[in-house]
Image: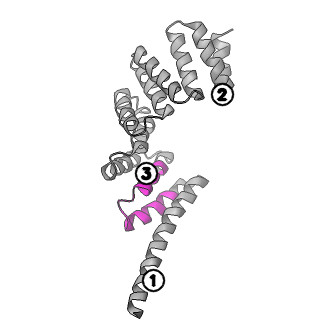
Amino acid sequence: MQKTFVVVLLALIIFSCKDERSELGDKYFKKGDYAKAVEAYTEYLKLEPAHVKSLYNRGRAYEELGQSEKAVADFKKVLSEDPMNANAYMSLASDFYYRQNDYENTVFYVDKSLKYDENNASAYTLKGKAFQKLGQLDQALTAYNDALSVDKQYADAYLSRGLLNVVKKRRSQACSDFKMAKSLGASNSDQVLKKYCN
């Protein structure tokens, strides 16, 4: 009986320590101390190497530190453990492929993300931006409209669609989108309004 109690107590202590290391990583991340967050997540992952949340969060911390190769490795490990993880697909799309000007892979990974989270306005907006960079303007417009059908208050979609309307020489629609973006607090909305709508 005593032996069983000791084993249970030891198991509880071990699991408690593991949870504390993961939570410690979260605390460091929230404080912006990404190097310490990486250390804490790495320690936790030694005990639980397939813990999806810690892998993903360590990847985000690596991103913040500018260590994109390590971030990508963590996101891909997340997907090997959880192939339906919409956040990992979006992180690959936005924080890696889009920044690398690889717009085809951006669209590919956004579509993977949307398969598991179809109500993500930022994903549709990113898809629109990638299509716009590829010169596929009709697909870009569809993606921006999809973003706004999911969230009518998503300022970045209005701003992005407004810039697309400028390219398509639809000035009144562009200005309407810029005004809506401004009313929703989009950064740069004053700048584009002055540039295109005065």
Dot 2 and dot 1 residues touching (CB under 8 Å): no
* Magenta stretch in the rendered image: 37-61
- As drawn, 9 above or below 88: below
Q: Is residue 173 magenta?
A: no
Where is residue 58? Give x, y as percent.
Answer: 45, 54
Residue 111, located in which quarter of the rendered image? top left
Depth check, front residue: 94 or 79: 79
Distance, label 3 to label 1, CA atoms, is 30 Å
Q: Is residue 49 magenta?
A: yes
Characterize the local packing of mark 1: few (<14), some (14-19) or many (20 or more) Cα atoms within 10 angstroms.
few
Q: Residue at x 54, y 7 (%)?
A: 170
Query: Looking at the picture, which amino acid does disc 3 mark?
Result: Tyr
Distance, label 2 to label 1, CA atoms, is 53 Å
Who comes first in sequence, dot 3 or dot 2? 3
Distance, label 3 to label 2, CA atoms, is 30 Å
- Residue, disc 1: 9
Depth check, front residue: 168 or 177: 177
Q: Residue at x 35, y 59 (%)?
A: 50
Who comes first in sequence, dot 3 or dot 1? 1
- Residue, disc 2: 184
Residue farthest left in this picture: 80
Query: Looking at the picture, which amino acid does disc 1 mark?
Result: Leu
Q: Residue at x 39, y 85 (%)?
A: 7
Q: What is the secondary structure assignment of the residue under circle 2?
A: loop
Image quadrant where one finds the N terminus: bottom left
- As drawn, 3 above or below 31: below
Q: Which mark is residue 56?
A: 3
